[in-house]
Image (cartoon, rainbow, N blue to C red):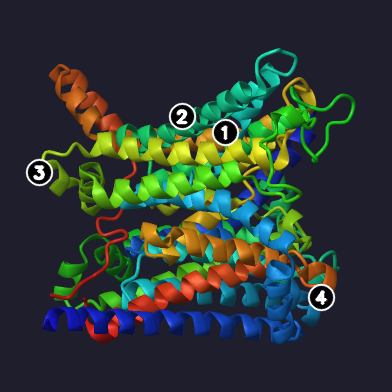
Amino acid sequence: MTGDMILLGLAGVIEAGAPIIIAAIGETLTERAGLINLSLNGTIILSGMVGFWAALTTDSIILGFLAGMLVGALVAAIVAFSSITLKQSQVAVGFVLAVTCKDLAYFLGNPIMGAQAPILYATPIPFLSEIPIVGALFFQQSIMTYLSILLIFLSWFWVSKTRPGLKLRGVGEKPAAAFNRGTNVVGLRYLYTILGGALVGAAGPFYTLSVKAGWKGTITGLDGIGWIVLALTIFGGWEPIRVAFGAYLFAFLQWLGLVLQSTLTFIPSQVLQVAPFPLMILALLFVNLGNTEWVERFLATLPEKLRVRIKKLIRVTRSQPPGALGVPFERE
Amino acid sequence: MRNTKNTARGRSLSFLFQLGGLVLALLFITIILLVVGANPLEVFSNIWQGAFGSTNRVANILVVWVPLALVTCGLLVTFTTGLWNIGIEGQITIGAIFSTGILRLFLDSTVSPVLVILLAVIAGIVGGALWAVLVGLLKTYGGVNEIFGGLGLNFIATALNIGLIFGAWSREGVASMSGTEPFPESFWLPTAGSYNFSWISIAISALGLIIVFFLLTGTHFGLRLKAVGKGMKSAHRLGIPPKKHMLLAFIICGSFAGLTGALQVVAVYHRLIPSISSGYGFLGLMVAMLINYKAIWVAPIAFFFAALNIGGIQLPIILKLDSTLTGVLQGSLVLFILLMQGVKQRVLGKS
């Protein structure tokens, strides 16, 4: 394998990670406000199909993305309405939507299977793209990939450095206290759920119009991505930068699987293709272990010095969900 | 007296809201069909004909009813314990793999086929339970939410299954998506005459329904599961160890799933195929939600969903519509009934 090929592969990892990042940051914003939108797997497939259809009929990539975002926002609005206003289980509604939106996409998308919609190609940035290595990795990508990188820092800044971000965190951590300070808890939860859904909805067309261009029904290859995004949100500990790191790691592992497949032919290809999934479970185990009772009990038996050190390590690696995640808000 | 009157009124009101959900779901489907330029009445009558047009088709509904009712039974146990066993698809698959493994082991032996089938079914149950307890252990001792542990294990089970079909257990010469070499007829569960369903499968499913109904409504153990489902802390205070009960719930549900996978091998496909779970695990989750986790409704609603599945098969052939319409219909039905339940609670207050 030559250096150029590795560079090309890594640039592909940045590209493959981009839609996952956009969706995962969308879900992070939603969950930071205290809601879980479990519908992602269906939302991404449906928005991918609708975005593809919109771009196909209008010949406009921008309209394709907007249509996908609209679908994502609408599905998220159903989750928000049923859980905030109707007080139904978020998990139940989200799961039903995950399954139903997927079927709906395949049903409605049947006539446009294999059609040729416009494709979003890379737009190299002048001068920057000529920098050795860095230019090839980061500055010869599509506009959406640039936006995904921008979104990482923008969302991090918004959540942890601004006043509205502080409010968002308050709504997800201690909604009752936020309400007493005069925050519109219900309104903000609606807002961030729908906004997060719109971002998730941008990931669908990102695939069908660029990263995995085309709509091919059940073999489009979008099934499963939504579940990965949900797991990455946890792995990322609800922090945009860590979430993005997880997305790149996942894309990297998938690329590695493809590369190894051609060299290690004795391993069946199916095994390497799913290798990221057991790793995902292990990663979730790794970031969650510090929260379990028995680990705490075990730590209590260790000598003082060692305990303090391990606890420091756990504090860095573990993920702690927003305090009121999945808990409906009741005004007293 | 007044009390009974109130509950009777409440029940009929409940029924009205559920009917409203049904009407909304049908309305939604009608709009979708109009969007794609199909005649809704034609579609609905086609589904009806596809499901009940001949005794053969009704027999096929029973073929789907058995696995669907069985997985829903198992899922009621985990739901009662407050657990989302999304890993059920993988548990079905592993059950099928285990039972296929046993059948292959005895292919050239002189052991009585009845005994081999029995062993294969038991192996399926064990396999499903093992895959489920893995999710349970990740949840109780690893802090990994059962939804994500289960999903990850689903992907792994599918890969293992396809890996076996194309690898170690592939057909002589041609490994293909059609599955492994079919087993000799002596390893098949006998079917009812020329129909596709087996009375033994039906009996097993009925037995499962009865067991789960009594387990959840008539035993102390069922009450303890319910207490754990209501909240870990309060269960702990009552002296019920939540972790142990969660693991037991996973084992029971996984056993049902594994049994389902084994039956799909010995009674339906007579071999291992890539999509051996047929999505019945996720469909079972939907059925459980639709019946609000009440065991008494499993049999009829599973039959209704099975009828929709069979009824939709004809759609691509006759009306050139994708058969995923059935899934949209089932999903929107569950969604709108859930929403109407929320509307009811909002309009009438909590009770």
Instruction: Choose the circle earlier in sequence order: 1 or 3.
Output: 1
Q: Which residue is mark 3?
A: B237
Q: Is residue B253 above or below residue A303?
A: below
In front of the other: A118 or B163: B163
- Amino acid type, label 3: Arg
Mark identifier at residue B130: 2
- Disc 2 and disc 1 in contact, CB within 8 angstroms: yes
In which chain is the residue bearing label 2?
A: B
Instruction: Examine the rendered structure and indicate whether residue A266 appears above or below residue B97.
Output: above
Numbered badge on residue B205:
none
Pick whichever of labels 1 and 4 is earlier in the sequence: 1
Same subunit, labels 1 and 4: the answer reads yes
- Residue designated by label 1: B94
Mark 2 burial class by Cα count in 10 Å: few <14, some 14-19, many 20+: many
Helix, strand or loop at label 1? It is: helix
Task: Please state the horizontal and vertical placement of residue A117, each as a whole percent of the image.
Answer: 82, 70
Query: Are the residues at dot 4 and dot 2 in contact (C-beta closer than 8 Å)?
Result: no
Q: Earlier in the sequence, mark 3 or mark 4?
A: 3
Q: Quadrant of the C terminus of chain B?
A: bottom left
Circles 1, 3 touching at the beta carbon (< 8 Å): no
The amino acid pointed to by label 1 is: Ile
Q: Chain of mark 4?
A: B
Look at the numbered discs 2 and 3 and tell me whether their residues touch, using CB distance below 8 Å. no
Please indicate whether residue B7 sits to the left or right of residue A255 in the image: left
Q: Secondary structure at mark 4?
A: helix
- The chain to which mark 1 is attached is B
Q: Residues within 10 Å of mark 3 (few under 14, many from 20)?
A: few
